[in-house]
Image: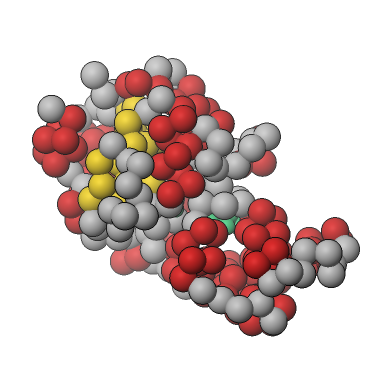
Amino acid sequence: DIKGFVFDLDGVITDTSVLHGTAWHQLADYLGVAWSKELADGLKGISRMDSLEMILKAGGKENDYTPEQKVELAAKKNTNYVAEVDKMTPANILPGMKAFLDDIRDKGYLLSLASASKNAPRVLAKLELTDYFPEIVDPASLKHGKPDPEIYTKGAQLLNLDPAQCVGLEDAAAGVQAINAAGETSLGIGDATELGAADMVFADTSLVTLANIEKHMA
Ligand code: G6P
Ligand code: MG
């Protein structure tokens, strides 16, 4: 039986995936790297430094910068991203997600957060959702990012649950792969072609309800 939910944040609880995308797009323009939907989708769920490497590789520029310069470039993107995050309010919670969080919490399910973002606590605070997530996997503690299962394995461990007792929620293909590899039930939010590996896919967050999940689990 399902006893817990392990949440991705960006693109699942709130549309920060758009803000991340815009900030990376700006940096790619600055670096002279062509932007594409494929590149944008591939960056979802990927850590800050790995995202920068992917962008540089896409432009054949991975050897053009020293490690110190790469840290500066990533910091530049983060400064732009954080400026956008600081404008956020609870109105930026994606449709239906507040109701879903209230419903599962009221029914006694356990919740944890498995976001690769070091800004996750800041985003939760802006959304006034900090209290919903006493258990947050610290992305700085990870040896491997998504699609490695580590972050989702830790998300279940924080709840003292077996992975088989958890549903993981993701908008990124790399995240769905991580959930599957961790042995949790994967719930994808977005394009069914992109998230085809998920156990269930919902087109948008307004469809994420316990009733709909139970229908798919039956
Ligand atoms: C999430 C987002 C990615 C982002 C990563 C790191 O996984 O989906 O787009 O790059 O977090 O975020 P951070 O806020 O630490 O730069
Ligand atoms: Mg995401």
* Image quadrant where one finds the C terminus: top left
Asked if residue 87 is positioned above or below residue 165 in the image, the reply reads: below
Quarter holding the N terminus is top left
- Relative image position of residue 71 (x, y in whole percent): 78, 61
Residue 218 versus residue 83 in the image, above or below: above
Residue 185's x, y, as percent? 32, 31
Residue 81: horizontal and vertical position, in percent? Answer: 57, 69
The correct choice, above or below, for 9 with respect to 86 in the image is: above
Q: Residue at x 46, y 70 (%)?
A: 37
Residue positioned 32% across, 47% down in the render: 196
Q: In which quadrant of the rendered view does residue 10 lie?
A: bottom left
Q: At x 65% / y 67%, what residue is drawn? A: 58
Give coordinates of residue 162: x percent, y percent.
40, 17
179 sits to left or right of 28: left
Q: Nearer the viewer, residue 37 or 29?
A: 37
Query: Is residue 129 or residue 210 the one in the foreground?
Result: 210
Please state which of residues 42 and 73 is positioned toward the viewer in this rendering. Answer: 42
Look at the image and tell me whether residue 131 can be seen: no
